Image (spheres, rainbow, N blue to C red):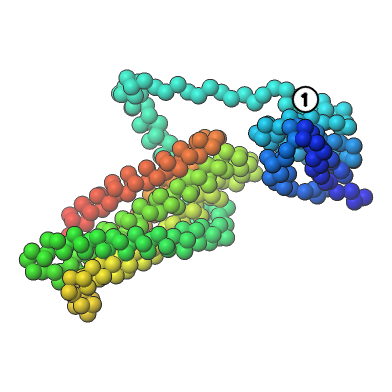
Amino acid sequence: MDSNPAGFQLITETSEQATLALTGDWAQGRAHRDFDILRDELPYIQAEELVVDGAGLGQWDSVLMAFLLQCYNQCCEAGLKFSTQNMPEGVERLLRVATTVPEHNPPPDAAPSLLDQLNPARLWRMAWARTHESLAFIGELSLALFNLVRGRANTRFVDFRQFCYQAGPDAFAIISLTSLLVGMILAYLGAVQLQQFGAEIYVADLVVIGMLREMGVLMTAIVMAGRTGAAYAAQLGTMQTNEEIDAITTMGISPMEFLIVPRMLALVVIMPLLTVYANLLGMIGGGIVAGGMGITPLMYIAEGETALGFDHMLVGIFKSLVFAVLIAVAGCRAGINSGRSSAAVGQAATEAVVTSIVYLIVADAAINIICQQVGI
């Protein structure tokens, strides 16, 4: 096969017109320059019109049409006139068909009135649809996990490892800052009351128990809901917009096994580790405040050891596992059920964060009640 690679050159001839000269074969299998180079140059040219010259054009197919349509759309966004010259007749006809009829944009749905929003029947239908959607998602996820246990799932270890890195090391900075400050705040709150009784030393007990059972895991979960849960929703929503999930389904691959399971497993593995790390940073933060109250580090550590119990750590680790599943489910469900527009992706990310936080609060309250009833 003769080597005649595709290429283009932008020539600014006058202030009224710039010429984009095409050369080579614009066909499948022939390498050509990236369109990003031209896209970056177009907004800065001084001409009012871009003329695409096909005099040096060789063979062509859909690759050329895709390139010309990108040029046309980019010129429309930059406010430039777009025209062609010396193009094959077939290219001119296809380009006229593609650009004559503007893209159809359906009108936005009218916002429901306040009366409609408070209609019990409408609220019931929305709640039922949401419940049905959630149950369907959980059912598909359960089947995907069952296939994973059987060794028949299309889940790749490299994806799991990548999501572990995304959820873990990349979150160290924000987890460190929030945990340290939460420990300090917890110590300050306790110090205000305990100083009235001369019992400042028990700040260590308050910080250790509070971080292990409640604040360490809860603050970590909230940070991960806003960071990782929203990221899951945005990633899957963008794939839905680009029809990548449809392509995966068409190839016979389950999106649950290929996309959802590695994300959820990564969060389940990373959350307990981040919780232990947050607990440690919170205790250090409490120790800093205790030092300001005249409590030496040795006294703080000695008193903290008396409050450090296996049951407290077990409750915190159990909560972290539950919270990890809830965050992953909320984020992935919002993303995979997202619409096919950029606005829908943003709504999915927002929905993922709000739903995750509601799940966390409800689950935290339920676990605390259960622990109180069983005496843990």
Q: Residue at x 61, y 39 (%)?
A: 243
- Asked if residue 20 can be seen in this view, the reply is no
Looking at the picture, does residue 259 appear above or below residue 185? above
Residue 87's x, y, as percent? Answer: 86, 32
| 155 lies left or right of 180 | right
- Within 10 Å of disc 1 (Cα), the crowding (few <14, some 14-19, many 20+) is few
Q: Residue at x 79, y 34 (%)?
A: 17
Choose top left, top right, bottom left or bottom right for residue 213.
bottom left
Residue 115's x, y, as percent? Answer: 32, 19
Looking at the picture, does residue 61 appear above or below residue 277? above
Residue 332's x, y, as percent? Answer: 47, 46
| 328 lies left or right of 279 | right
Where does label 1 land, which residue?
A: 96
Identity of the residue furthest to the left in this view: 197
Q: Nearer the viewer, residue 11 or 252?
A: 11
Q: Nearer the viewer, residue 282 or 44?
A: 44
Choose top left, top right, bottom left or bottom right for residue 168.
bottom left
Callout 1 amino acid? Arg
- Asked if residue 221 can be seen in this view, the reply is yes
Local SS, label 1: helix
| 346 lies left or right of 42 | left
Identity of the residue furthest to the right in this view: 2
Residue 147's x, y, as percent? Answer: 51, 52
Q: Quadrant of the C terminus?
A: bottom left
Q: Residue at x 21, y 64 (%)?
A: 187
